[in-house]
Image (spheres, grey):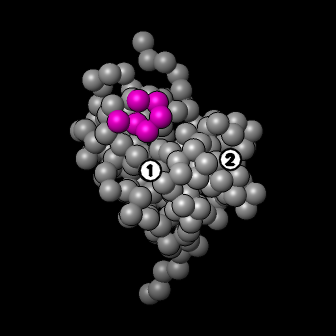
Amino acid sequence: MTIALDRPVGSTDPATLVGPEVMESLSARITKDHPDIDRATARRIVAQAAAFLAASAQRSGDELSPSKLVDIGWHTWILHTVDYALFCEQVAGRFIHHVPTEDGQQADGGPEAALKRTLAAITQAGFTIDPDLWPAAAKMGECSQCHAGCSDSPNGGKKSK
């Protein structure tokens, strides 16, 4: 018996989720804001941010967290609000909120567990992982720009009581 998958697990390049104009705009912004990152690496960061967001959309009940480099892509994308909102609507059918954690707060199981959960979710969503961009989950308190841990909102951005 042969089983054929429309999209083999872990084999789709997440850059295909991002239009060429948006890819170029975000990559240019990353290299401008982070001179130590070259354009090719910036494109890889945007692609992995797209994979992270698509996986977050599919696993909205899980607390997923980007790596430090992928978080740069997410923060950059959020600044381009029109493109970000459109992307979220296309891949999730809703806006994907960015939720910094409070000081001292950690993801369930800590950064290592969040990394495992996130990489598993990306793979299960069918996207390739660029291992050079995921050396470790963004450690709480070391998020590249918000200076707090960052995760997608498992409750759709609603504040918990």
Look at mark 1 in the image and give the residue it sits on: 69
Tell me the kind of residue under disc 1. Leu
- Please name the residue shown 54% across and 61% down the image: 38
Quarter the N terminus occupies? bottom left
- Please name the residue shown 44% across and 50% down the image: 69
Residue 51's label in the rendered image is none
Q: Quadrant of residue 86?
A: top right
- Report the mark closest to the observer, 2 or 1: 1
Q: With 115 as the anchor, is 94 left or right in this view?
A: right
Q: Residue furthest bottom?
A: 1
Q: Is residue 10 above or below residue 108?
A: below
Question: Which region of the structure is painted magenta?
Answer: 142-147
Residue 87's label in the rendered image is 2
Q: Position of residue 8 (x, y in %)?
A: 50, 73
- Magenta segment's dominant SS is loop
- Please name the residue shown 49% across and 18% down the image: 159
Tell me the kind of residue under disc 2. Phe
- Please name the residue shown 44% across and 65% down the image: 130
Viewer-side residue, 103 vs 94: 103
